[in-house]
Amino acid sequence: MAVEDVIKLASEGRPRMPIFQRDFRWEAKDRRDLLDSIYRGYPVGTLLLWKNPPSTVAPSSREGGRALGGAVSGPPGGGDRYLVIDGQQRLTTLWEGLGRAPALGEVALVFDIEREEVISRPLTPDEIEGRPPQREGTGLPQVPLHLVLDAALLSAWVPPWMSLEDKRRYFELGKRIREHKLGLYIVEHAEIDALRHVFDRVNSTGKSMRRDEVFNALIWSQVSRGGNTGLALVNAELAELGFGEIPHLTILKAFEAIRGGKVGKLDPRKLEVVDAEADLIRTAKALRATVAFLRGTAHVPHVAVRPYELPIVVLARFFALHPAPSERSLILLRRWLWRGSLGERLGGASGSMQQHVDDVRADEAESVQALLRRTGSPEGLSFDDDEWSKTSASGMATARGKAMVCALIAQWPRSLRTGERLDAGDLFRNGSSDGVQPILRDSASGAHRGRGMVNKLLHPPGTTARALILECTDEAALVSHGIDAKAREALRQGNVEAFYDRRERALRRSVEAFFARHVELERDDAPSIAMLARRSA
């Protein structure tokens, strides 16, 4: 139904607010955003209305609801009535902003035609009455939005001194708002208890659109290359690297970090499509460099086994600012990433991500040093028995478990069917769970609980992991998974503890060697001499 027709119903007192609706809660910004969305043609959700409640629910009763403020108390001639089950905030905003003249001193909605922006402010008496504005300076006057639904009122308000082109801008504004279609669900033949239940379902279930979905819908759907649009375009640029698809929300955070604003605070309506396209391409290039670093230098082979999201966002900003960093910076960044991951310092609240993003500035060496100071200190890190117990028992859903998978993939595990090296892109094509198979299923005795990756095999799904191990005749392929001949024989004989013990010792040697190479706890973290010389020059 067009907005002007919805307002007509409201003026006749047909929509009514049931008592189970909350009080009007929207702030001025919410009201402005709704009208701005309508002006721009964005979807604004649907209204859920109960048409002609039973005669037992009389309009004058508590359950019959109340009319919108300033509207007549009931429909003329006993016409259709509608209880508003969902959409009170939107309908009230439309009525108060478009359907009635505000009182003197009341904050109203007006439209700045030059800035194409809805603003809130009290109106003058002339504005309330709809009198034509006088010429003041060179700017165009702001139009009160309660005048735009009625074409005659708007025409009477538009002053004769305006150019024809400017007059058309106001008439186009009125046309856009009047004709914008609102989605309505109309329910008939229901009981009040059923409608209360519907109200509860509508307001307590379902999922709101994520921020990346909003950006894609409003901005990036207009950015297209090679058949891909928006955030999908970035992953298309990275596809050949075998890293897997980076989550869209992570790409959005990287986009915000590269632009230099607050991560999580960018308003899509403030973006111009041309600027957004340029920054999205810049983000794709920075993420390409990030993925190359993660795979080639840090040995994080796939997005499914990244211990944390934060390094992807921070590194994207780093490579956007420093596309050709020194070898020393790359080594130090690898230390930062792995020290922060093993120390479990890179998760947590969004504030931590923002602090890391803010650490990356125009000075390459100082950016790296700031990251090391924040979460890359070697303090508190060790490879003792307690640490190993926590790591080896961790599952794939944890940062430690994913870190261990990275270490295991660095051993170049081979297929127990063909003897070929396994590719991380193939292993985790459908997520981390597909590439990690349990060797022994859980039992009532609990013998396999807490074994973590010791009881897992990195291998594509198909034949059970236990059968693969027992049937494999390629000893080198088995050793690449930390399984020697004695471990396999223990498994064949059902000596589970002996199998676990032997495999755990083999995995610990390779995993701790990987971690030691990447965190380099005893090494000096100073910038390169060349960097120091340039900074002092």
Image (spheres, rainbow, N blue to C red):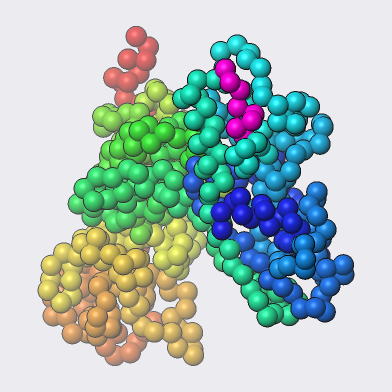
Please name the residue shown 52% across and 43% down the image. 176
| Residue 152 screen position, x and y as percent | 62, 37
Up the image or down, 235 lies above or below 196; here it is above
Which contiguous range is marked in magenta?
154-161
Please name the residue shown 40% across and 39% down the image. 255
Which quadrant: the N terminus? bottom right
Whether residue 296 sits left or right of residue 83 in the image: it is: left
Quick check: is 159 in the magenta stretch?
A: yes
Please name the residue shown 53% across and 48% down the image. 179
Note whether residue 97 is visible. yes
Up the image or down, 117 lies above or below 182; here it is above
Q: In this view, which residue lies farthest toward the right? A: 61
| Residue 130 screen position, x and y as percent | 70, 31
Please name the residue shown 68% across and 80% down the image. 189
Whether residue 100 sits left or right of residue 334 in the image: it is: right
Quick check: is 225 in the magenta stretch?
A: no
Image quarter of residue 86:
bottom right
In the image, 470 versus 316, the foreground residue is 316
Q: In this view, which residue lies farthest toward the top? A: 537
Up the image or down, 491 lies above or below 317; here it is below
Which quadrant: the C terminus? top left
| Residue 424 screen position, x and y as percent | 25, 61
In the image, 1 versus 444, the foreground residue is 1
| Residue 535 screen position, x and y as percent | 37, 15
Image quarter of residue 137:
top right
Image quarter of residue 487:
bottom left
Note whether residue 388 is visible. no
Total labels: the figure holds 0
